[in-house]
C-alpha cells in the first residue's frame, strides 16, 4: 500500500492509507549517489528518470498529468529512491508496551532477509544491490502503547504516523546515523494490531515533505510492515517476505495495481498487484521504469503496418523483453513473455502477456489491465488467495489479441527451441 488521493477501501485484505504527501519522493539519504553498481548495471537514477528519450522509443515513453499519483509514465518522476546500484535500507524492529516483541528482533528481521535482497537481485538482473542494514539489533520499544498512536486501516500520516516516526527517530538516534541510508523499513512486532487475515495495515509513506527530520534529512521514505500475511496454507516461511518488496516498490515509484475489486485487473503477474501467495515477478513495463532494461531491450511499435518481433523470457537476462504499442500520449499495450523461472516460479501457463498501461490513471485505480486470452476459464492456478482467473491469461502460438476499435492486432506466431516467442504486431 502507499499514500492514496483519498481514504477508501481498496480490498478486504489490503487497504490504502491517506497521507499528506507530494507526488515526488524525497530520499532519506543524502548519499544516494555513492552506491556501486552490480556487474552489468547501468547508471539510471531515481526510477528510470535518466532514460534517454531516443527517437525510436520516444513515442512509447507515455506520461500522465502532474496530479497523477505514482504515474505509470516513463521516465519516472524525479525524486524517488533510485532503483539501480547499491541501495542501503535501514531496517528497524519496533514493539510496544501493550504489544511486546515476540521472540528476538533478529528473528523478525530474518522473516524478510535475505529473501527480499535476493528477490530484487533476481528481478533486476543484478542491477539493484539492495542492502538491508540493522544497526539496532534488538526490539526498539516505543514510548507509547500501540493503541495510543491510533493506527488503523487507512490511517493518515497525521497525527498517528507522524508521532510514531518521531518517537522512532528519538529512540534510535543514539545508534543510527540516518544520513547513511536511502530508505527506512519498520518491521512492527506482529502482535501489534489486527491479524493480516482480517485487515492489512502495511503501508508506505513516500514523498512526505512534512516528515520528521533525523540527522538533517527527512524520514520521507518509510515502509511499515505489520502482521504476518499467513493464509494458513503453511507457505508463510517461503512467501511471507513478499509484502516488503511490494512496499519498497512504492519507494521506487511504482503504484498499486490492485483496485477496489481486488487483484482482478492484473492478477498475480506483478508483485504490486498481489504480494501474497507464491512468488511472481514485476511486469516488464515496471522493469523498464526502474532502469532494469536497456533501451535495446525495448521495441516501440508506433508505426503503421506489420512488424515481427522475437521476445525472450522476461526472467532471463539479455534479449528483447518488451514490445510497446502506444495508443496515444498516455496509454498503450505492453507485450512480454512470461515463463516459469526466476521470480516467476508459479506461472502455470507460460506465454505472451498483453496488458494495457494508462499513465493517466492513479495508483489503486487500475493503471494496468491484463488482457485475458481465456475469458471466464477460472484460471489454471489453485494457489490460495490468488486471483486465479488471470493466471492463464498469456497468449500462446496461434492465438491473437485484437482491439478493432484501436486497430491493433497482436499475434503469437511461433516459438523456438530456446523458448523465445515470435510476435506479430499489426497496426491497421
Image (cartoon, rainbow, N blue to C red):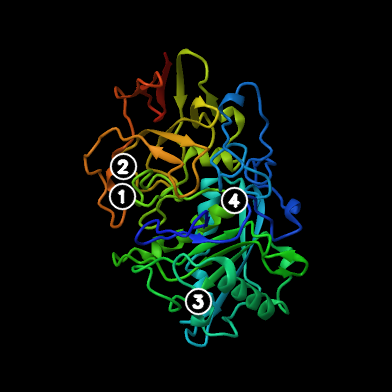
* 169 vs 124: above or below: below
Q: Which mark is residue 387?
A: 1
Which picture quadrant has residue 173? Answer: bottom right
Labels 2 & 4 near each other (Cβ < 8 A): no
Q: Earlier in the sequence, mark 2 or mark 4?
A: 4
Q: Considering the numbered disc 3 on the image, is that residue within a helix, a strand or a loop?
A: loop
- Judge the density around disc 1: few (<14), some (14-19), many (≥20) Cα neighbours within 10 Å: many
Q: Which residue is mark 3?
A: 150
164 and 334: which is toward the camera: 164
Spatial distance from mark 2 to mark 4, Cα to Cα? 26 Å
Q: Earlier in the sequence, mark 2 or mark 3?
A: 3
Q: Considering the numbered disc 2 on the image, is that residue within a helix, a strand or a loop?
A: helix
Q: Give the label, 1 or 3, closer to the camera.
A: 3
Assign the C terminus to one quadrant of the image: top left
Q: Give the label, 4 or 3, closer to the camera.
A: 3
Which picture quadrant has residue 329? Answer: top right
Spatial distance from mark 2 to mark 1, Cα to Cα? 7 Å
Residue at figure coordinates x 22%, y 39% from the top left? 376
Q: Considering the numbered disc 1 on the image, is that residue within a helix, a strand or a loop?
A: loop
Labels 2 & 1 near each other (Cβ < 8 A): yes
Spatial distance from mark 2 to mark 3, Cα to Cα? 37 Å
Q: Which residue is mark 4?
A: 252
Q: Which residue is mark 2?
A: 390
Residue at figure coordinates x 36%, y 55% from the top left? 278
Spatial distance from mark 1 to mark 4, Cα to Cα? 25 Å
Labels 1 & 3 near each other (Cβ < 8 A): no
Amino acid at each position: 500500500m502507499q499514500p492514496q488521493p483519498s481514504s477508501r477501501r481498496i480490498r478486504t485484505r489490503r487497504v490504502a492509507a491517506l497521507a499528506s504527501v507530494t507526488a515526488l519522493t524525497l530520499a532519506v539519504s543524502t548519499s544516494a549517489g555513492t552506491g556501486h553498481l552490480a556487474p552489468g548495471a547501468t547508471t539510471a537514477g531515481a526510477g528510470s528518470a535518466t532514460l534517454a528519450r531516443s527517437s525510436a522509443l520516444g513515442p512509447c515513453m507515455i506520461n500522465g498529468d502532474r496530479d497523477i499519483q505514482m504515474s505509470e509514465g516513463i521516465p519516472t518522476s524525479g525524486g524517488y529512491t533510485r532503483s539501480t546500484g547499491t541501495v542501503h535500507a535501514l531496517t528497524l524492529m519496533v514493539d510496544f508496551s501493550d504489544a511486546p516483541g515476540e521472540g528476538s528482533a533478529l528473528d523478525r528481521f530474518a522473516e524478510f532477509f535475505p529473501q527480499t535482497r535476493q528477490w530484487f537481485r533476481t528481478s533486476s538482473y543484478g542491477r539493484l544491490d539492495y542492502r538491508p542494514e540493522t544497526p539496532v539489533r534488538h526490539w526498539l520499544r516505543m514510548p507509547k502503547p500501540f493503541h495510543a498512536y491510533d493506527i488503523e486501516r487507512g490511517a493518515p500520516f497525521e497525527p498517528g504516523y507522524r508521532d510514531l516516526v518521531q518517537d522512532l527517530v528519538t529512540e534510535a538516534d543514539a545508534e543510527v546515523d540516518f544520513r547513511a541510508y536511502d530508505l527506512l523499513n519498520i518491521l512492527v512486532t506482529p502482535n501489534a494490531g489486527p491479524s493480516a487475515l482480517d485487515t492489512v495495515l502495511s503501508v508506505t509513506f513516500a514523498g512526505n515533505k512534512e516528515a520528521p527530520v533525523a540527522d538533517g534529512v527527512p524520514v520521507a521514505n518509510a515502509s511499515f510492515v505489520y502482521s504476518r500475511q499467513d493464509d494458513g496454507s503453511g507457505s508463510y516461511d517461503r512467501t511471507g517476505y513478499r509484502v516488503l518488496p511490494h512496499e519498497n516498490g512504492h519507494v521506487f515509484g511504482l503504484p498499486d495495481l490492485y483496485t477496489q475489486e481486488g487483484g482482478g485487473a492484473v492478477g498475480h503477474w506483478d508483485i504490486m498487484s498481489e504480494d501474497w501467495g507464491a512468488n511472481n515477478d514485476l511486469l516488464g513495463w515496471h522493469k523498464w521504469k526502474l532502469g532494469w532494461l536497456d533501451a535495446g531491450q525495448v521495441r516501440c511499435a508506433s508505426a503503421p503496418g506489420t512488424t515481427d518481433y522475437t521476445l525472450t523470457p522476461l526472467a532471463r537476462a539479455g534479449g528483447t523483453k518488451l514490445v510497446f504499442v502506444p495508443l496515444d500520449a498516455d496509454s498503450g499495450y505492453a507485450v512480454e513473455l512470461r515463463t516459469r523461472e526466476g521470480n516467476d516460479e508459479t506461472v502455470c501457463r507460460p506465454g505472451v502477456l498483453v496488458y494495457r498501461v494508462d499513465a493517466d490513471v492513479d495508483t489503486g485505480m487500475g493503471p494496468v489491465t491484463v488482457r485475458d486470452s481465456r475469458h471466464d476459464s477460472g484460471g489454471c492456478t489453485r494457489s490460495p488467495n490468488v486471483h486465479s482467473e488471470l493466471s492463464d491469461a498469456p497468449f500462446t502460438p496461434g492465438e491473437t489479441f485484437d482491439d478493432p476499435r484501436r486497430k491493433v492486432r497482436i499475434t503469437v506466431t511461433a516459438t523456438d527451441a530456446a523458448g523465445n516467442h515470435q510476435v506479430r504486431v499489426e497496426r491497421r
